[in-house]
Amino acid sequence: MRDRLSPWYEGSDKRAAQFSVLYVLENLTRLLAPVTPFISEKIYRKLFFSDGRPASVHLCAWPKTDESLVDRKLEGAMDLARSAIEAANSLRQKTGIKLKWPVEELIIKAKDKETEAVLREMDSVLRSMANAEKIVFAGELRQKEKLPFEYGELALGPVLEEKAFARELMRTIQMLRKKDGLNVKERIELYVETDEKTERTIEKSRDSISNEVGAARIHKGLPHKVGIKGELDFEGKKVRIYFEKAVEDKARKK
């Protein structure tokens, strides 16, 4: 959901994601109004008030249950998926694998065929939330590090180091952007200085890095006579980082 709400995301499902978030937030704001009157009022006035609507959240109608939106089968499947995801995250903590580091696979030994069938249907959710490239079902887990959960047992595949490095680089740049006071829509010229091998690793993830951190362009090396915004040292890969607000191409030509 977070990716689909990015200012730079242009997928066809963006409007659906925006509608879902606003629908839930508005109804939640109404439900919270009696308990947290001031913050609820601020959220309502900032996001939802417009001409023709009640002037205050406290004048809005109480949300009504819409049974047509309830999908019991999906809720049950999500309970299974949530249990597996929580177990996977616990195993990450136990083995020292950060949540943002993608793993090659999440291996699941389901307690029965019915459970396995439901979890297979939740493949995309499991891959996204467990940060795994693929979900594998097995009759036996041979991995040394494994963890039982309510619906079976699971283990993690090896960390995808190049992708884990890219995630750490993106996280670092995002933190530096926030420190500099840039808003989410402001694009940057990104400069990175590192060794040739790490440059090749960055090049492989150029598009995803650009989209995630709002970089109009990524440049090799640092501009002359400037300092750096920050550094990243990840498993021996050292990167010095600098960025500045992106300038429109037309303005550059003047």
Image: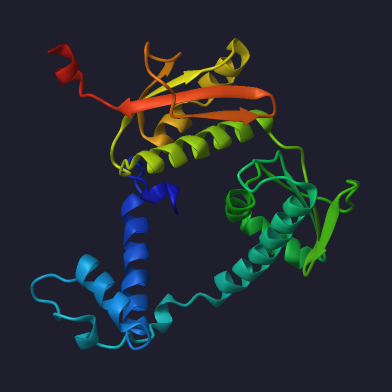
Q: Residue at x 20, y 19 (%)?
A: 249
Quarter of the image with the C terminus is top left
Q: Give the total of numbered labels.
A: 0
The picture places residue 247, in percent across and down from the top left corner, at: 23, 24
Between residue 183 and residue 60, name the one nearer to us: 183
Q: Residue at x 66, y 44 (%)?
A: 132
Quarter of the image with the N terminus is bottom left
On the rendered structure, is 4 left or right of 153?
left
Between residue 228 and residue 154, name the one nearer to us: 228
Q: Kindly tell me whether residue 251 is visible in this rendering.
A: yes
Between residue 192 and residue 101, name the one nearer to us: 192
Q: Residue at x 51, y 75 (%)?
A: 71
Q: How is the image coloured?
A: rainbow
The picture places residue 224, in percent across and down from the top left corner, at: 37, 11
On the rendered structure, is 93 left or right of 19?
right
On the image, which quarter does residue 46 sit in?
bottom left
On the rendered structure, is 103 left or right of 111?
left
